[in-house]
Every structure is written in structure tokens, then in C-alpha cells.
Image (cartoon, rainbow, N blue to C red):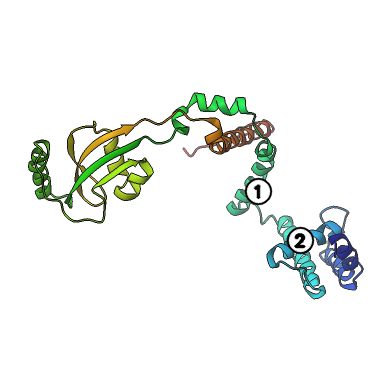
Amino acid sequence: MPFKDIVQRLLKEPLAHFLIAGALVYALLSGRAPDLGERRIVVDERVVSALVGRFSDSFRRLPSQEETDGLISDWVRDQVYYREALALGLDKDDEVVVRRMRRKMESLAVADAESRTPDDAVLQAMIDKDPARYADDPRTTFEQVYLGADTPQNRQLAEASLGKLRKGERVGAVPAPIPAQLRDAGSSDVAAMFGDEFTISLRNIAPGQWSGPIASGLGLHLVRVEKRTAPQPPRLDKVRQRVENDWRANAAARARDEAYDRILKGYDVVIELPK
């Protein structure tokens, strides 16, 4: 059944009329005359459609008549308490309320920016401005010898082992669940196995000679980089989604700041610091 038909059927129900009348009676009994603004609670087609729609999204079915009555009743209760809380000033100096209202205002400010789509020229200009951001990681082929935990004793052992390796001699490695060699590994692959500290150190090792020791999350390693392949220049068709995400985030930030600056002009801000 279409939402419109459901709403029209629900608005004919006595309970809906009762709730609307009850809200108005509440306003009268509170000692303030109802007006056509804050003190009037209207359960119309838009409200009921939204309630039924949220229920349907959550439970993948339409609510029964009893469930719909409950949704309407709970919505009216929310409105009554919300408006009374505002009238009593309970929203003042409430950090949670302030933050939530700020987020709503910021959402309104950035909605248009987030819905726009940039053209290819704009995206390509972003790539040209910072190609390293969108380029693939350099690929590294290297072998490593694991020496165990990072201790003074093992650091001494590393110096002796490094000399042997540079002479072409073999040295014993401590057994560990990591490969002795990785081929064409990207930074993310290396970091997943050895950690960020090792990955950063690996970038500074010149190819062709054993170096170290360098530390990982496991301990100490001696490393020989066989080759390092520079990344290809980024192409828009390969990195479009990443660039669009950055463009949209930047556009939203600008829209948010511009909206704030416009609103701020209407306020006189006085900052009184404690003496």
C-alpha cells in the first residue's frame, strides 16, 4: 500500500485526533495560551510518512495499526517534552545540545558542496599539484636476516654478522614467522609484516649492500635491498575516487568555514579572560 494511502487512513483514526487534541489541552492547562507556532503540534501526512518510513527501513515491513498509533504517540511525546524543555531553557549551557545543533548547522552548510561533482580538469589539477599523494608506493625487493629481540647483546651480534654478510659469508638467523625475502613489496605489505618503523628505515637503505641493524616490531634485522622500483606517475582514471574524495572534503571544509564567517558577522563576540 502506498505511503500516501497509509497516511490518509491513519489520519482518519480517532487516536490521531485524540493525540492532537490532547497536546492542545496540555498547552491550555500549562497556563499559556496556545498559538499557531511553538504550542501547536500537528501530526500531518509528512510526519506520519516519516515515522512509517523509518519503521519500514528498520524492520523491512510496514507497521501495523497498533504500531503506527504507538509511533505517533511517541512522536507527540517527544515534541511535548522537547518544546517544554526549550521553554524552560534546559537547552542552555548543555554541551551535548550545543554540539548537536552545531553539527546540524554544519551539515546544512556543506550539503550543496558534497552533492556537486568536479570536472576532470579540476581533478587533474589536484593530481599535478601533489602527484606523490596519489602515486602508488615504490616497490621494493629485499632480503633480511632476523637476529632476535632488540637487546644490547644482539646489537653486538649484528655488527659481527653484518661484516660477514658483506664478505659474502652466511650467518645464522633466528627462526621467525616472516619471509627471508620479499619481491616487489609495497609499503603497506612491508608494514603489515614488519611494522611502520621498519618500513620507514627500509626507504633509506641504498640497494646492493647489506645494511643494519634496523628494528621492527619483532626485533633486529640485517637487510639487503636488491632493487627499488619508482612508482609510475598517477593517472586520473586509476585514482579518480581518491581525488574526488579529497576534492569533496576540501569543498565541504570551505563551505563550512564560509558559512561560519557569514553567520559570525552578525554577532558581537566579547572574550573576557580571567585576570
Question: What residue does disc 1 label?
Answer: 101
Residue 150 marker: none
Q: CA distance from mark 1 to mark 2?
A: 24 Å
- Please, what secondary structure does the residue beneath circle 1 have? helix
Asked whether 69 or 132 is in front, the reply is 132
Q: Amino acid at mark 1?
A: Met
Q: Quadrant of residue 156?
A: top left
Q: Residue furthest right?
A: 12
* Camera-nearest residue between 204 and 262: 204
Badge 2 marks a residue whose secondary structure is: helix
Residue 222 in the figure: left or right of residue 113: left
Measured from the top left, where is residue 115 in percent x and y? 68, 39
Q: Residue at x 86, y 63 (%)?
A: 7
> Where does residue 211 sit, x and y in percent of width and height?
18, 37
Disc 2 marks a residue whose amino acid type is Gly
Residue at 21 percent across and 32 percent down: it is 208
> Which of disc 2 and disc 1 is earlier in sequence?
2
Residue beneath the point at 65% across and 48% down: 101
> Is residue 44 something that shows in the picture?
no
Residue 12 falls left or right of residue 274:
right
**Label 1 Cα neighbours within 10 Å, binned few <14 / some 14-19 / many ≥20:** few
**Pointer 2 residue:** 53
Residue 217: where, in percent of width, then height? Answer: 26, 50
Q: Along the horizontal axis of the image, is 236 left or right of 18?
A: left
Percent position of residue 188, x then y: 38, 44
Compared with 132, 104 (above or below) is below
Q: Is residue 137 visible?
A: yes
Q: In this rendering, is residue 101 above or below 115?
A: below
Is residue 106 or residue 189 the one in the foreground?
Answer: 189
